[in-house]
Image (tube, rainbow, N blue to C red):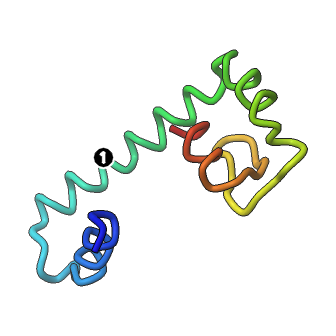
Amino acid sequence: MSIATELSERALTIRLDSVSEEAIHIARRAIADTVGVALAGRAAPFLAALGEVLEVAAAPGEATLWGGGARASVLHAALING
């Protein structure tokens, strides 16, 4: 079993009623921070060039590019959103 598979299976067993309020608070802040930083960085000039190199517009996929609404393959969206 791969690490990603094992992590996802473990994540699916977590129930909010078994997690401390502090852990939930930290997780919410971390998610908000991730999304905020990704959206703030969306205007970085190199992302347009990266999108062109990856030919994102020519080959839209099933994943959304944050902050723009365009779509790309899962791998390309992970790279650009990250």
Residue 46 found in image quarter:
top right
* Most foreground residue, 12 or 4: 4
Q: Name the residue under label 1.
A: 30
Q: Can you give x and y, in whole percent of width and height, for residue 16 in the image?
A: 22, 78
Q: Is residue 82 above or below residue 63?
A: above
Please, which residue is most extreme toward the front here?
Answer: 1
The answer to whether residue 76 is above or below residue 50 is: below
Q: Nearer the viewer, residue 25 or 3?
A: 3
The percent coordinates of residue 64 (x first, y second) are 69, 54
Q: Tell me where residue 58 appears, x and y as whole percent.
A: 90, 44
- Name the residue located 40 percent from the left edge and 46 percent from the top edge: 32
Residue lying at the far top of the rendered structure: 45
From the image, which quarter does the N terminus lie in? bottom left
Name the element at disc 1: helix
Above or below for 27 versus 45: below
Taking the image as shown, residue 73 lies to the left or right of residue 52, namely left
**Which quadrant would residue 4 be assigned to in this image?**
bottom left
Q: Position of residue 27 (x, y in %)?
A: 25, 55
> Horizontal placement of 55 versus 75: left or right?
right
What residue sits 72% from the left and 63% below the top?
A: 62
Direction from residue 55 to residue 14 in the image, left or right: left
Q: Is residue 5 left or right of 53 when viewed as pictured?
A: left
Residue at the image position 31 percent from the left and 55 percent from the top: 28
What's the residue at 63%, 30% (across, down)?
Answer: 42
Q: Is residue 61 above or below residue 20?
A: above
Q: What residue type is labelled 1?
A: Ala
> How many labels, in total?
1
Q: Callout 1: 10 Å neighbours few (<14), some, many (20+)?
A: few
